[in-house]
Image (cartoon, rainbow, N blue to C red):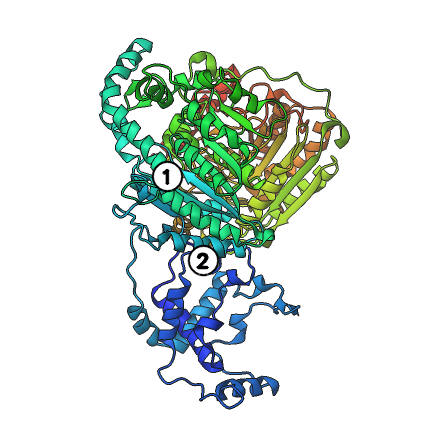
Amino acid sequence: GDFDAGRDVLDGAQRASVCRIVAGILAEYGLDPGAAVKFHRELGAPKTCPGSGVDKAQLIADIRAALPAAPRSAPTTKGGASAASRRAATARTAGTPSALPLPIAYLVSRDVAAPVDGVAAGFEDWTVGEDGVSARGLSLETAARTGDAALELSASLARTRGEWDDLRPFVVNLSEGKLSRGGKFKMDDESIGHIIERIRTYAETTETPRLMLHAHGGLVSETSALTYARAAHKWWLDHGVYPIYFIWETGAFEVIRNKLGLGRGIGDWWDRRFERFARPLCKPLWDDMKDYALRSSAENAGGGEPGGARTFAIALRSLIDNQPEKRKLALHAVGHSAGAIFHSHFVPLLCDEGQTVESLSFLAPAVRIDLFTDMVLPRLGTGITRFAMYTMDEEAEKDDDLIEPLGVPVYGKSLLYLVSNAFEPEEKKAAILGLDERFRSVKAITDLFRPGSKHSLEFSHARGKPHNPATHARMHGCFDNDNATMTSVLAAITGLTTTVPFPVADRKCDKAASRARGLALDDWRVTATPPLPSPASRSGSVNGTRKALCVGIDNYPDSPLAGCVADARAWARALTGLDFAVTSVLDREATRQRLLDALGHLISGARPGDTLVFQYAGHGSQVEDLNGDESDRFDETLVPIDYSSGALLTDDDLAAIYRQVPTGVTLTLFMDCCHSGTNSRFAPVDRSRARGERRRFLELPSHVEDAHRRFRARAGAPPSMQTETSWPGVIHFAACLDDQYAYESGGQGHFTGIATGLLAAAVAATDTNEGFAREVERKVTALGRPQTPRLMPVPSGASDRPLLSGAAGTGGIDAAVSTPMTVAGALDDRALAEWWLQFFETSATQLRQRLGR
């Protein structure tokens, strides 16, 4: 199980079995649970096993309760060893195995590495194999040996858990600046100490310990802030960072979005009237919120009690001062919107306590510039090593309408303008740090971001402009759940990139960030692409590195195929002949995680001018859309070899990777599976007579669909990725339309057999992507099967670039260009005709289904 907080729960019969087995081993060797039971993470493991949701003290108490009433160990002898332990030692010496609650084969899946200097190496291999067969075997063996006792014990071990108890190691909850004594998440006098102990354990078992201190923005209730922390904290832990969330009572400010009228934002005249209307209602609430931010770090937050953040800072200092230098905890602070006000008091406090804050990241900061220059600016370069600000440019700020719950814009600018013009003491144009037009006139601020500075400024741009790879947020409230922004913050903290999407998503944020929504007619066209380079050279030194990933899967446990491994090998040979460095992943190697890792490796190291290829041959399928971004309620999916566990590779997963293709890099896809197109999205019906072919479509049984739901519940559904979008820099050749099957016969896929045969000649002749696609389509359709290969819609001009030329144009994450189905993209006559053809073919297939033909 995944026993980290918020995931699986070690409870019931499973917990009872664990306790009984461990108790049996301890009793056999006369050992005390408190001294002998060690968690994996205590052995120097760079992970949290058995999971942050397992309380060791409680588990040991449960193990004690499971010990036999009459201990098997005899009284201690004069030599200090019990009779039981001497018997066990004698048995080991004589080569006779001691009786254990489980056979040793179930306890150790591989040979244990020999100890080195008293520390056993390779401890990560001391585990039962993480697969269904081993789990079932262990379960059956445990049931046979424990019998009904496990069920009886599970009842006695049943525990009640508070709704938010799993977050207690990660949340500091404040009320009016002090530790919260009420609400949904109470903090008692011992709470901070427990948190510090968890941080200590993390730091002692992590090679490079890092602490991320997060302060949320305004308009956030206690429940919303806790829900965000629950969704996000595992993502940080998985990337080696321990998160702390300060929840500091800004929920009363929700009246801004709940009660401020229903007027329509119609320009500056209305906005000025609205500011006058909002000021008396919301300014007092804004003032209170700023006061709570100040109190949180104050010596006296009221009634002689120190601020809750100050209490945490003092306890943290005690921990850090007593750490060995090589495992010193690095501090990083992240504040969104009003959270920048909180951190403008708290981070200076940390500095004054003698701590160094390695990075401070402000997301759309709502802090006044005078507070920032007084409190934060003097500590940059001394107590604060690096500062980064993510915010919107002026045009984007003025394009970000505040939205009332009924969907009616009530204010024609972003929240920062409303704060500046209505809630701050000056009635007009208070200098707010996150406002582009306000901080640009302050030399002390602009000097921070001069070329070569260690501090950084990242703007998200208004609709119609290319995306900044570092931040895509086009609404004020979206920065702290925008994948591009949060992965940029992660990279600033750890120096690492990730292909794992940030787990908190908001549909309205995805919509605002998409260039495919809400654009004027003139915005439908893609900006002009750079001139075509000279014909593609076969030399990597001229046009960059050429790398390929080739995947083929035949040996599915159900519905095996016979030509996919051969396809992958054929593509590998063809691409090797074109100077590509090829990585192949075949059959049993092709698990979901292996494919994600291989794709991430292919893309993460790419540089402008590089040419990449991803080829896949195997089953395709459809599965229930769990994040609501598909109009037909189904996601298309590749089917890895371990699909029966629910580990499918959906179009959302793939889109999250494709969007990471760097500017100036070309990624070409050759997908030989059913559903390799991306428009119509419904299961195909083909009543033509089979001629010895296999269809590369796997209808998922209900138990796999259920497993997929459970898998996504644990891993988190990927954010909406506009999967009908063609990403600039990505050229996609599909073996068939969405409402068709991809076929194989004679030990090879129809699409692959023809495409690989034409590839070398097409590259040598500098054939275009469009020309190559037409020739492949002509030859495949001539086989007489209902399979129509196609080149998926691409950015304007890309279809006319030479095949595998490395000319990526404006590149991966700068701008998403939709297909005509999402009302964007290059709507030239051919693209529009392609769309109508697909529409009518889809409609005809649906009508045939209804008529039973």
The disc labelled 2 sits on which kind of residue? Gly
10 or 137, nearer to the observer: 10
Above or below, comparing residue 127 to residue 699 in the picture: below
**Does any portion of residue 6 appear in the rendered image?**
no
Measuring 29% from the left and 39% from the top, which residue is drawn there?
A: 176
Q: Residue 298, which numbered label?
A: 1
Q: Give the residue drawn at x 50%, y 60%.
A: 131
Relative to the observer, which residue lies in front, 702 or 228? 228
- Check disc 1 and give the amino acid type: Ala
Residue 484 visible here: yes
Residue at position x 63%, y 39% in the image:
602
The picture places residue 310, in percent across and down from the top left corner, at 39, 43
- The reply to whether dot 1 and dot 2 touch (C-beta < 8 Å) is no
Examine the rendered structure and indicate whether residue 173 appears above or below residue 759: below
- The local crowd at label 1, few if under 14, some if 14 to 19, many if 20 or more residues have their Cα within 10 Å, is many
The picture places residue 136, in percent across and down from the top left corner, at: 45, 66
Which of discs 1 and 2 lies nearer the camera? The answer is 1
Quadrant of the snapshot with the N terminus: bottom left
| Residue that label 2 marks | 51
Determine the secondary structure under disc 1. Answer: loop
Farthest residue toward the front? 304
Question: Residue 643: x and y, percent?
Answer: 48, 51
492 left or right of 265? right
504 versus 23 height, above or below: above
x then y, percent, for residue 374: 45, 27
